Amino acid sequence: MSAELLSNINDRYHMALHFHRESADLFWFLSLQGYATLHEFQLLEEGETQRKIKRYIFDIYGVPIVDNVATGTSLFSLLTQGQKRHELTSDVCWNAIKRAWEAYETWELETLQEYERIAHELFSQGDIVTFNFVSDIIKDVGEEVRNISNELSRLKTMDFDLPQIIGEQEDIRERYLKKMKEIYD
Ligand SMILES: [Fe+2]
């Protein structure tokens, strides 16, 4: 039972990886390299966590859980509307940035809720060791949610001002490139 609960988290990680990959594509396409690097960092970090979950399932429970690799709908196609980069108007860009950030917040909030539900079940079953393992994952997701909510509030207060957003990209990219390097330190 605990292995199945962990398997649900593992499958959601695959959806998360898909989400971050698509978001990175979208922001590279929009030439917003800072946001693209943010999602590439999350892709890397959550890829590591997915492997950690899978190793845990095999080492602790020894059951042959197979990954359910989701692809889902394409955020990238939806927001770029099949247009080439040079055809994008500032309205399309503005709308894509806003919707991508809102989708990001919704995704992570739902993820947090789902993992909390699973942690609660593990605790009820008395599987405290795995409950603690999932609690660590929840802490990471909680921190991601906090960062997104802060950034989204900030973006809303400036009504997603494009020149300001473009001007901030280099600093954001530097910050996330540094965080990427730290993963392997
Ligand atoms: Fe994430």
Image (tube, rainbow, N blue to C red):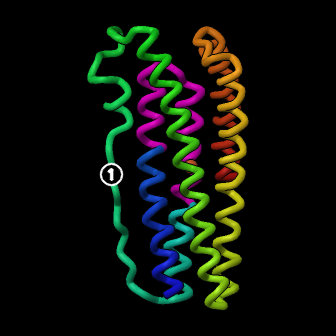
Give residue 177's position: percent from left, percent from top.
64, 35
Q: Is residue 171 left or right of residue 58?
A: right
40 w.r.t. 136: above or below = above
Q: Residue at x 66, y 24 (%)?
A: 155
Give residue 93's position: percent from left, percent from top.
45, 17
Q: Residue at x 69, y 42 (%)?
A: 179
Residue type at numbered disc 1 = Thr
Q: Residue at x 60, y 18 (%)?
A: 160
Give residue 174's position: percent from left, percent from top.
68, 28
Q: Is residue 131 left or right of residue 62?
A: right
- The prevailing secondary structure element of the residues shown in magenta is helix
How many marks overall?
1
Name the quadrant containing residue 69: bottom left
28 inside magenta stretch:
yes
129 w.r.t. 73: above or below = below
What range of the chain is rendered magenta? 20-48
SS at badge 1: loop
11 w.r.t. 148: above or below = below
38 inside magenta stretch:
yes
- The residue under label 1 is 71
Residues packed near mark 1 inside 10 Å, few (<14), some (14 to 19) or many (20 plus): few
